[in-house]
Amino acid sequence: QVQLVESGGGLVQAGGSLRLSCAASGRTFSNYAMYWFRRAPGKEREFVAAINRSGGSTDYADSVKGRFTISRDNAKNTVYLQMNSLKPEDTAVYFCAAAPVYYSGSYYYRAYNYWGQGTQVTVSS
């Protein structure tokens, strides 16, 4: 069992930055690829970013490419999402997820073993 707890959300003005953290406990963190998703009000869950087990490979949704950076610290059992140049359309609840497989390039209709409870990000215009 892996427990995932997100933190770092909040209210920020457009153009600002936030860093989300997802702390993992339980089984070996480095055995899992990690993912960030988000769900905006009235919308479906959307893939945001992914990172493989070693941190050597990352991927991003086109909507956040160049603005968001995913990283991980396996010694601290934590994955991060640095979000810069935030836009009102980034407003959503952000979730981290873990899977033993790195679903490179294809993130929907996949099995994610564990999910966090989510953290709210609100970007004001």
Image: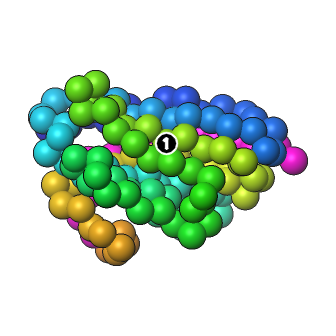
Please name the residue shown 29% across and 47% down the image: 55
Q: Nearer the viewer, residue 54 or 4?
A: 54
Q: Amino acid at mark 1?
A: Leu
* Residue 116 figure quarter: top left
Between 27 and 84, which is closer to the camera in this rendering?
84
In x, y percent, where is residue 118? 47, 41
**Toward which corner of the image does residue 25 lie, by quadrant?**
top left
Residue placed at 22% from the left, 47% from the top? 54
Query: The N terminus lies in which quarter of the figure?
Result: top left
Q: Residue furthest top?
A: 76
Rate crowding at label 1 as few (under 14), some (14 to 19) or many (20 or more) other CA atoms within 10 Å: many
Residue 59 seen in the current view = yes
Q: In the figure, 23 relative to 93: above or below?
A: above
Residue 94 percent across, percent down from the top left: 52, 47
Magenta range: 110-125
Find the residue positioned furthest to the right: 125
Q: Which type of secondary structure does the marked residue at label 1 adopt?
A: strand
Q: Residue 110: horizontal and vertical position, in percent?
A: 28, 69
Give the x, y percent position of residue 63. Answer: 62, 66
Q: Which residue does the numbered mark 1 point to in the structure image? A: 81
> Magenta includes 103?
no
* Residue at x-position 75% and y-position 39%: 16
Can residue 117 be seen at all in this image of the molecule? no
The answer to whether 3 appears left or right of 9 in the picture is left
Of residues 41 and 23, the one nearer the viewer is 23
Name the residue rendered at 57%, 62% in the picture.
65
Horizontal arrangement in the rendering, residue 64 relative to residue 24 (left or right) = right
111 within the magenta span? yes
